[in-house]
Amino acid sequence: MKLNQLTLTQALAGIKAQKFSAREVYDACVAAIKEKNPDLHAFLDHTDGSNYQDRGRFHGLPLAIKDNFCTHEFQTRASSAVLDGFHAPYQATVVNKLAEAGFSFLGKTNMDAWAHGSSTETSDYGPTKNPRNPAHAPGGSSGGSAAAVAADMCLAALGSETAGSVRQPAAWCGCVGFRPSYGRASRYGVIAMASSTDSPGFLAKTTADAALLTPLICGPDPYDATSSPEKFPDLSPHLATSLKGKKIGFLYLDIPGLESTRAYYEQAWRDLEKLGAQVSAATARDPQEAIGVYTVVQRSEVASNLGRYDGLRYGHTRDHFGAEARRRIMLGTFLLSQGYADKYYVQAQKVRTLFMQDFARLFSEFDILVSPVSPSFAKTLGSSEGNALFGELEDIFVEPSAICGLPAGSVPCYHDPATNLYLGLNIMAPFHHETDVIEVMSAFETGTHWNSWHNQEK
Amino acid sequence: MTNTTYDTNFVRHIGTLAKLDLTDEQAAQLAGEFQDSMPVVDALLKIDTTGLAPTYQVNSLSNVTHPDVVDEAHMFSQKQALANAPRQHDGYFVVERVIDHEA
């Protein structure tokens, strides 16, 4: 097996046992990028192999970073032509934290421009192909990060989620996605999209890797007033092999549109029961309403956040916005305009309150909620074109928890041998209960054979 | 409040507010997209939210303040601040003139 195919956990064990060096793992990832990236286009910018630095606890092991995190080593564009050539004068807090932990950075991964989308097709630099099946999209907006992990071009990749931008590409690319609660990881130096829901997270090969990485980027940050002052827990002690005594609610299986995939999610239900969990169908508010809330909140916050791009201090002029960004700025500008802000923006925030109350009710009955991540397998490249609400419809099952800032993850729960594509199981816990999500993700991975890297570790 | 017609005149008005210069083709396309998107948004208006407070953010923090001290490690030099500016003059950003005529 090549060293780039290792999980982070395996790489650390191999280095400790002196079987190989971190430098060799880094070199293997750079070689994989040079071989695969011209076709897959997961990275917009990547190192030529000269930025390895042995520093700290993680020995300079290589990670990839989504292009909406400001970095010293690479330009930061959020996949938008507006920021072409932009070299950030400061680095995101979470990137600083990863550097301090001792990681090297391979490069910046492709995404939907400004993270507007769920396919990575709205990137102003062209789409990324899904490494599992290159006729298909990787999902998004962290599609480049998910593809880089799935193609073993890195050990793990930093991503970010506003609706489902970590979980959905993880599901479509057959890897693991995990996002802590809103406010756990600092947004300082992350190109702002929807400030009330943006949350950094990881695309990783296994739950154990995500559990190792996530605490490194979490904790209070004086530069982000919305960052939580509470100490973030260690996640690794919560890796589990049994779900005995857990009460799990299964959501959304009765929603129309799941006809072709429902049977596989029902299998996941039985797998959870085999692990000892008590699983029942749970009924939540109609997720269609969450699409409405998300559309209003996201478009409004986008219109406000993207108002700063005037091409005077940095970046290019506003005519460089792509079609998707233009569409979102326009809708948000209207929703916030005089006479409409109360009607739409405030009403959407009140419906968000209803979703918060709904989750509080559900979590009084269940320890954990699970659902499909996506109604479908990865769509073919080109599917998002001309659909103003493509992302919203693809993210219908992950949006309710995202607008409430809940911690959540996705693990592979089916692999279709004919297309080599995957489905993901969405696992959600109450606010700040990251440890519960990790418990269920890891137990599910242990009790099933869908995660290829987890199999390789056995 | 009267019902809004999502036509190209409406789109051009919003484009002015958003500081986006739109071509005729873009305006026509955006009008169609408004018509596609607004039913999802308008559906929210049917939900009864009487007596509910809006949730603007989810982590219940309020009045988060900074210690009032100068953080020199966290300041840009003039050179750094200007490094990405496409137009500059004598150490300043060059901005568009906003007053065209003398009164």
Image (spheres, coloured by chain):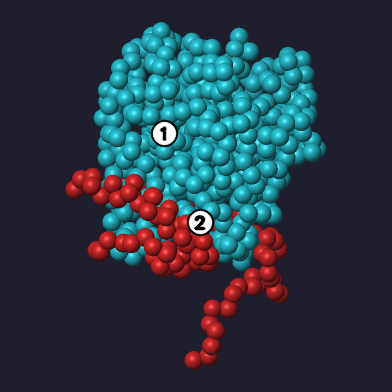
Chain colours: A cyan, B red
Give above or below for A246 relative to A55. Answer: above
The CA span between labels 2 and 1 is 24 Å
Quadrant of the rendered structure where residue A320 is? bottom right
Question: Local crowd at mark 1 within 10 Å, few (<14), some, or many (≥20)?
Answer: many
**Residue at point 62%, 41% (across, down):** A127
Disc 2, SS: helix
Give above or below for A293 relative to A334. Answer: above
Q: Quadrant of the N terminus of chain A?
A: top right
Q: Which mark is residue B84?
A: none
Q: Is residue A416 visible?
A: yes
Q: Kindly report which numbered mark, 2 or 1, lies closer to the viewer in this rendering.
A: 2
Q: Is residue A187 visible?
A: no
Of the two numbered discs 2 and 1 on the same chain, state the one appearing first in sequence: 2
Disc 2 residue type (three-letter)? Arg
Given the current orientation, which residue lies at the most extreme bottom position?
Answer: B103
Q: Which residue is mark 1?
A: A398
Residue A157 drawn at (x, y percent): 61, 33
Total of numbered circles in the picture? 2
Image-based side of A27 in relation to A386, left or right: right
**Residue at point 43%, 32% (across, down):** A407
Residue A65 drawn at (x, y percent): 63, 38
Residue A64 drawn at (x, y percent): 65, 35
* Residue in the foreground of this view, choosing between A403 and A135: A135
Residue A130 drawn at (x, y percent): 61, 31
Chain of the residue on which disc 2 is drawn? A
Disc 1 residue type (three-letter)? Val
